[in-house]
Image (cartoon, rainbow, N blue to C red):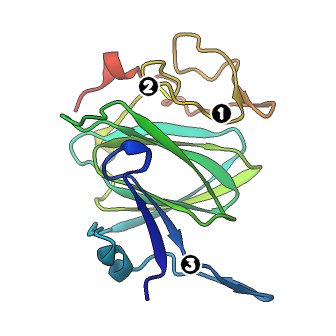
C-alpha cells in the first residue's frame, strides 16, 4: 500500500509536486516513511537521487534563489525542525510557465515534501526561530556552476509571507524584516541580478 499522496503540477507548473507522506502516530509519537522509490515510481516519479543535504538556519534567513547552470539538479525538499516558505521558479527554456513561481510552507508539523524538477531556481525563507532543512538531489553539487536570481526581483514577483520592506532596486536585505527580525542574506545572495538582466543558462 502506498505511503504517499502526490499533488502534481502544483500552481499550474508542470513537474512541481507536493508529496504528503502517511503519518502513523499514537501516544508515543509518530512514524513516517520519508522516502520510498517504489511509492514514487507508482506515482510516475522516476527521479534517481544521489546526494542528501541538510542545513540549519535561524529566523529571517533567506537562502536563494539558486540554480545550477550546466548541471541542473532536481530536488526533493522537506523540513525536519521549524518552518520555512520554500519557492521554485521555472527557468526551463521553452516552458509555457517560464519565470512563474510557486511557494509552499514546509514544516516539521505538516511533513510536506516539495519535488522541484531540473531547470528551476530555488530558495527558502525561515519563518520559525530555527529550521532544519533536508533535501535530496539527483546530481552532485558543482560549486563553480552555480547561478542565482534576486530573491525580490519584481520581474518574478514572489510574495514572501510575513516579510515587510520595500524593493530598493537590488537584492540587498536592508529595510526588510520577518516578524520584526531583520532579513539575513549571504553576501552572494545580496548581489544576484533580476531574471530579465541576469538569467543565462
Q: Nearer the viewer, mark 1 or mark 3?
A: 3
Q: Crowding at label 1, few (<14), some or many (≥20) Cα neighbours within 10 Å?
A: many
**For the residue labelled by badge 3, is the local secondary structure a helix, a strand or a loop?**
loop
State the mark number for residue 156.
2
Residue at the (43%, 66%) spot, across then down: 6
Q: Crowding at label 2, few (<14), some or many (≥20) Cα neighbours within 10 Å?
A: some
Q: Nearer the viewer, residue 180 or 40?
A: 40
Q: Judge left or right: residue 85 versus residue 99.
A: right
Which residue, given by chain and number where applicable, does mark 3 sit on?
22
Q: Earlier in the sequence, mark 1 or mark 3?
A: 3
Which residue, given by chain and number where applicable, does mark 1 sit on?
184
Q: Judge left or right: residue 101 versus residue 145.
A: right
Q: Is residue 118 above or below residue 54?
A: above
Q: Nearer the viewer, residue 37 or 129?
A: 37
**For the residue labelled by badge 1, is the local secondary structure a helix, a strand or a loop?**
loop
What is the CA distance from the residue labelled 3 to the residue labelled 2? 34 Å
Q: Crowding at label 3, few (<14), some or many (≥20) Cα neighbours within 10 Å?
A: some
Residue at the (28%, 69%) spot, across then down: 44
Residue at the (47%, 75%) spot, across then down: 4
Amino acid at each position: 500500500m502506498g505511503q504517499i499522496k502526490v499533488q502534481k503540477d502544483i500552481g499550474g507548473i508542470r513537474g512541481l509536486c507536493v508529496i504528503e507522506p502517511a503519518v502513523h502516530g499514537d501516544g508515543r509519537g509518530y512514524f513516517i516513511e520519508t522516502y520510498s522509490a517504489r511509492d514514487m515510481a507508482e506515482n510516475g516519479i522516476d527521479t534517481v537521487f544521489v546526494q542528501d543535504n541538510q542545513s540549519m538556519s535561524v529566523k529571517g534567513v533567506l537562502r536563494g534563489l539558486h540554480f545550477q547552470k550546466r548541471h541542473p539538479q532536481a530536488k526533493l525538499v522537506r523540513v525536519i525542525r521549524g518552518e520555512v516558505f520554500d519557492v521554485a521558479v521555472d527557468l526551463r527554456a521553452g516552458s509555457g510557465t517560464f519565470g512563474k513561481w510557486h511557494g509552499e510552507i514546509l514544516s516539521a508539523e505538516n511533513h510536506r515534501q516539495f519535488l522541484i524538477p531540473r531547470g528551476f531556481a530555488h530558495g527558502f525563507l525561515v519563518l520559525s526561530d530555527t529550521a532544519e532543512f533536508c533535501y535530496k538531489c539527483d546530481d552532485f553539487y558543482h560549486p563553480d556552476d552555480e547561478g542565482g536570481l534576486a530573491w525580490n526581483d519584481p520581474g518574478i514577483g514572489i510574495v514572501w509571507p510575513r516579510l515587510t520592506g520595500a524593493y530598493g532596486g537590488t537584492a540587498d536585505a536592508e529595510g526588510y524584516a520577518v516578524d520584526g527580525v531583520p532579513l539575513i542574506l549571504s553576501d552572494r545572495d545580496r548581489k544576484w541580478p533580476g531574471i530579465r538582466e541576469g538569467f543565462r543558462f
